[in-house]
Image (cartoon, rainbow, N blue to C red):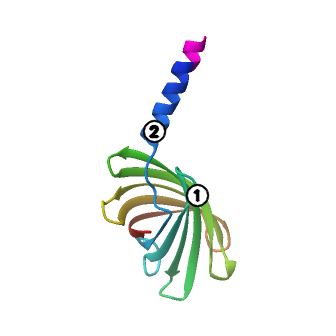
Amino acid sequence: MKKSFLILGLLLTTITVINAQEMSDNAIGLRFNNKDGLGASILYQKKMTDLNRLEINLGLRNEFSSFKGTGLYQWVWNLENQFNWYAGFGGGFDSGFSALYGAGIVGIEYNFNAPILISLDYRPEVGITGNYDGIGNSFAFAIRYQF
C-alpha cells in the first residue's frame, strides 16, 4: 500500500514538473484580429498562478466611434520547448455597456528567448444583450512584451 502511494506521488510530481513553465508576471501588447472596426486591440496579461493568467483587451470598433473591452481567465499548458497552448473564458462589453457578451478563447503561443511572445488564437463570442446577436468569431495574431 505504501509503495502504491509512493508511486502515485512520484507520478503526480513528474506530471506537474513536465507541465510547469516559466510564465512572465506581466505582458503588454497588441492583438490584431478580423473583427469590426480597426481590427486591433491593446492587451494586458497578469499572471495569477503558475498555470493561470488574466487577460484584458481594449479595442476600437466601427471606425473609432466606439470601443470594446474584454476580460478572459486563461489556463496555460506547455506543449514543447517554448510553445504553449492556452484556453479560457470570460466576457466583455461595448462602449457605454450598450452590449454585453460572453467569450471563450483557445490559442497557441511561442515564447522567444527574448522578452517577446507571439500567439495565434480563436475567440468565439456570444451576445447576451444589446446589438450583439448570435455568435461572433475572431481569429487573431498577437505580439506581447513580457516583464
- The residue at which mark 1 appears reads as 48
Assess disc 2: are there few (<14), some (14-19) or many (≥20) residues with their C-alpha within 10 Å of its C-alpha.
few
- Tell which of 93 and 72 is nearer to you: 72
To which quarter of the image does residue 32 belong? bottom left
Q: CA distance from mark 1 to mark 2?
A: 18 Å
x 43%, y 55%: residue:
107
Image coords of residue 14 (percent x, y):
46, 32
Predominant secondary structure in magenta? Answer: helix
- The residue at which mark 2 appears reads as 17
User: Tag 2: residue type?
Assistant: Val
Quarter of the C terminus within the rendering: bottom left
x 46%, y 56%: residue:
23
- Residue interval drawn in magenta: 1-5
Residue 102 appears anywhere in the view: no
Q: Is residue 59 left or right of residue 32?
A: right
x 52%, y 30%: residue:
12
Q: Secondary structure at mark 1?
A: loop
Image coords of residue 131 (percent x, y):
63, 74
Q: Which mark is residue 21?
A: none
Q: Secondary structure at mark 2?
A: helix
Q: Is residue 74 above or below residue 140?
A: above
Q: Is residue 104 above or below residue 62?
A: above
